[in-house]
């Protein structure tokens, strides 16, 4: 029987560190990702694709800044919406070409956050290009950007990343997948919006972590599986050390123990494992695997699975 699967795609699926980001490169990466997604769909599963947008939203913001003498700059939530359209279009075109009989749509999605979320005072989410330490110090001085190191890969601009409270368009997503549509949604974690006392929504300057939003969406959709695709085939303990050990099946308790022991780095594997543990607490299965292994992992034959029952 087909499962309802929320499939979160890592940044590498669209743009890898070191790649500049011209359209052909990004489209090529998206085509590779779409092949794996199409395999899962062809196995009969109902799929919702969530993707990251860190590199793209940062570049859109920078484009705005560079051309502001001629064309007015747009705020960050608008840049997030643009990144959803940009990446969604690439996904939608690739997936439609591979699955011509399937309805494929990209849904512009807003994610509600709390305007009092502490994260607004402590930017942690890396976006845009990578810089050297010297460049990053200069950018902090000249532009007032908050900069930080990103998982040992260089320095990037940091923006606030509040926790997702709810996915505003979840009912529409439900209707679409119940009708067999392949949906690309909640891109870049969703456009962050806050609700005022009169129930009105408005965009805020932040970028939500897509793994956290994928978890929220999985909960709200009552998905069977949360699947996080990244650039490693498994999660490991003692990662990168001589005594590195591959993890295949984990109980919630074991996953939490390894988490508490610090085996999963902040800002990379940490939030992914956290999302998996939370999802497994619902009595379901969450998977982390490489892009290529998606279909196999769903059949229980690859990746790292956190089992909730
Ligand atoms: N314990 C671990 N097991 C596997 N990978 C880990 C671990 N800790 C950190 N990582 C790193 O996490 C990276 C994936 O996270 P990230 O780069 O944020 O992915 P994405 O951009 O795909 O969301 C891997 O490339 C790996 O370097
Ligand atoms: N929004 C988000 O989490 O993007 P990345 O996965 O590209 O960092």
Image (spheres, grey):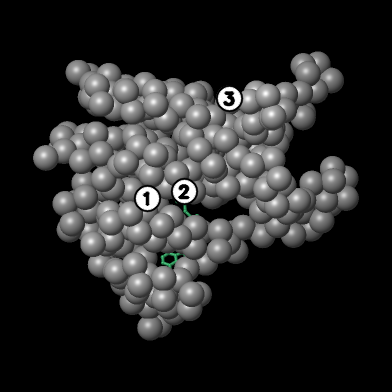
Q: Earlier in the sequence, mark 3 or mark 2?
A: 3
Q: How crowded is mark 3: few (under 14 residues within 10 Å), some or many (20 or more)?
A: some
Residue 193 visible in the snapshot = yes
Q: Is label 3 in a helix, a strand or a loop?
A: helix
Q: Which residue is drawn at 28% across and 35% down?
A: 47
Q: Specify the label residue 211 is tagged with.
A: 2
Whether the residue carrying mark 2 lies under 8 Å from ligand 2 is answered with yes
Q: Is residue 108 above or below residue 225?
A: above
Q: Residues within 10 Å of mark 2 (few under 14, many from 20)?
A: many
Q: Is label 1 in a helix, a strand or a loop?
A: strand
Q: Is residue 43 above or below residue 273?
A: above
Q: In this view, does 123 lie above or below 263?
A: above
Q: What whole-number distance in Å separates the C-alpha atoms at marks 2 and 1? A: 7 Å
Q: Earlier in the sequence, mark 3 or mark 1?
A: 3
- The answer to which image quadrant residue 2 occupies is top left
Q: What whole-number distance in Å separates the C-alpha atoms at marks 3 and 1? A: 23 Å
Write down the residue under mark 1: 228
Label 3 or label 2, whichever lies nearer to me, is: 2
Circles 2, 1 touching at the beta carbon (< 8 Å): yes
Circles 3, 1 touching at the beta carbon (< 8 Å): no
Residue 176 coordinates in the image, percent (x, y): 31, 23
Write down the residue under mark 3: 82
Whether the residue carrying mark 1 lies under 8 Å from ligand 1 is answered with yes
Which residue is farthest left?
1
Q: Earlier in the sequence, mark 2 or mark 1?
A: 2
Residue 263 coordinates in the image, percent (x, y): 46, 73
Between 112 and 108, the residue placed more toward the observer is: 112
Q: Residue at x 45, y 44 (%)?
A: 216
């Amino acid at each position: 029987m087909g499962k309802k699967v929320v499939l979160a795609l890592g940044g590498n699926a669209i743009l890898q560190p070191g790649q500049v980001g011209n359209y052909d490169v990004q489209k090529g990466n998206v085509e590779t990702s779409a092949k794996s997604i199409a395999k899962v769909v062809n196995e009969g599963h109902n799929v919702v694709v969530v993707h990251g947008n860190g590199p793209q939203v940062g570049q859109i913001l920078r484009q705005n800044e560079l051309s502001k003498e001629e064309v007015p700059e747009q705020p960050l939530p608008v840049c997030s919406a643009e990144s959803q359209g940009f990446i969604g279009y690439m996904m939608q075109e690739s997936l439609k070409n591979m699955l011509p009989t399937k309805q494929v749509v990209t849904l512009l999605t807003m994610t509600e956050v709390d305007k009092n979320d502490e994260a607004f005072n402590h930017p942690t989410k890396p976006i845009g290009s990578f810089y050297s330490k010297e460049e990053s110090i200069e950018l902090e001085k000249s532009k007032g950007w908050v900069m930080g190191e990103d998982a040992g890969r260089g320095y990037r601009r940091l923006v606030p990343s509040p926790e997702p409270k709810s996915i505003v368009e979840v009912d529409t997503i439900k209707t679409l997948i119940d009708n067999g549509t392949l949906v690309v949604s909640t891109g870049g974690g969703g456009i962050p919006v806050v609700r005022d006392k009169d129930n009105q929504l408005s965009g805020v300057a932040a970028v939500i972590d897509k793994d956290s939003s994928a978890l929220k969406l999985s909960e709200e959709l009552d998905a069977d599986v949360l699947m996080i695709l990244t650039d490693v085939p498994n999660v490991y303990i003692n990662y990168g050390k001589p005594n590195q050990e591959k993890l295949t099946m984990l109980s919630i308790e074991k996953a939490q123990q390894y988490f508490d022991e610090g085996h999963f780095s902040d800002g990379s594997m940490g939030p992914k494992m956290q999302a998996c543990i939370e999802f497994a607490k619902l009595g379901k299965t969450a998977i982390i695997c490489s892009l290529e292994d998606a279909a196999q992992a769903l059949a229980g034959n690859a990746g790292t699975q956190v089992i909730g029952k």
